[in-house]
Image (cartoon, rainbow, N blue to C red):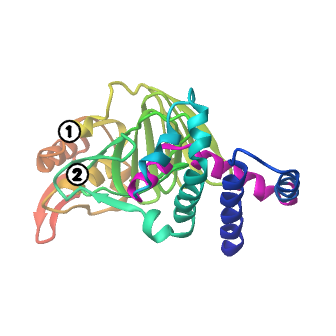
Amino acid sequence: MAADLRAIDEAAAQWVQRMALPVQDSATAAAFDRWILDDPRHVDSYARMVQLWQSDGLRQALAANDVPDSAATALGPRGAPHRLWRSAALLVPAMAAAMLLLIVAPPLLRDPVRHGAPPGAMRVVALADGSRVNLAPGARIAVRMTPWSRDVTLERGQAFFDVAHERMRGFAVDGGQARVRVLGTAFDIDRMEGEAVVRVYRGSVSVAAGAGRQWRLSAGSGIALRGGNATTIDGITGSRPDWADGWFDANNTPIRQLIAHLNRGAATPIRLADPMLGELQVTGRFRLSDPEDALAAVAAIHDLNLRRDARGLVLSR
């Protein structure tokens, strides 16, 4: 199956090369018509290759592979078509080679790049497309950029994405329980065990979950997905999440979520003596850099005991 798709992509790239030449004969046009109509996958692959042909990503690939300046000239303003055709004989093979390099050498150009934040510290990552990602302590992402897609996997933790707008290239984040798709916006996704929470601060996003479920969220709204349950979130304010400034804002939030966030940056592990205590809810603002003070406040609210043992801090009845 994968080999078939690879062969289709290679054929599509070669057809883009042939159809971009300034002169076409009737035999070539007829052969193209037969190929494009032979399989619906040919249409999809050819469309992606055309998008790649016209993309800035291919321009960068040509530059990285030392394509001569005379060929690069053909990528200039549309107001000079004669320059394009005069350079086509040189440009087309170079562009096709760059396209095929992108297609047939995924380990070199498509393997994800991983970024992480150490425990106890946040990190800001600037992506190649101009997007910026704030990583919470302990968070890790894997980024794969191609000329036709921008894909990120939030492997663990929480991250705030300020996405650069691109009309032709979407931006997708896989957060486990939720998959978010955007063009240009600002949103936060928090990946926890069996749970994902998405909050939107600018623009709108599409969130997909299992069983074909999908939601469209606008700025100021969010959704929490846990197992098969979905809970909408309203009243989100500001231009970015408070954790980026070192705070955790809780609004009828389960204690387990607060503890999960505190544990990401805490030098001393925190646990609950009884997992059921994690469903107790809290409302308030807690400083993430002072977990013991935050836990003391939680203990006071719910009449719990906070103690320290050899394994760390423990909340119990």
- Determine whether 92 is above or below 251 in the image: below
Answer whether labels 1 and 2 touch (C-beta < 8 Å).
Answer: yes
- The answer to whether residue 265 shows anywhere in this view is yes
Please state the horizontal and vertical placement of residue 214, each as a whole percent of the image: 63, 42
Please state the horizontal and vertical placement of residue 180, each as a whole percent of the image: 52, 45
Q: Quadrant of the C terminus?
A: bottom left
Residue labelled with disc 2: 262
The part of the chain drawn in magenta is 37-65
* Amino acid bearing label 1: Phe
- Determine whether 60 is above or below 93 in the image: above
The mark nearer the N terminus, 1 or 2, is: 2
Please state the horizontal and vertical placement of residue 100, each as a whole percent of the image: 57, 63
State which quadrant residue 227 falls in: bottom right
Residue labelled with disc 1: 286
- Is 56 a magenta residue? yes
State which quadrant residue 248 falls in: top left
Q: Secondary structure at mark 1?
A: strand
- The answer to whether residue 173 shows anywhere in this view is no
Marks 1 and 2 sit apart, C-alpha to C-alpha, by 9 Å
Please state the horizontal and vertical placement of residue 97, each as a whole percent of the image: 55, 62
Q: Measuring 62% from the left and 54% from the top, which residue is drawn there?
A: 210
Q: Measuring 34% from the left and 61% from the top, which residue is drawn there?
A: 114
Crowd class of label 2 (few under 14; some 14 to 19; many from 20; radius 10 Å): many
284 relative to 105 in the view: left or right: left
Crowd class of label 1 (few under 14; some 14 to 19; many from 20; radius 10 Å): many
Q: Measuring 61% from the left and 33% from the top, which residue is drawn there?
A: 81
Q: Nearer the viewer, residue 32 or 231?
A: 32
Q: Secondary structure at mark 2?
A: helix
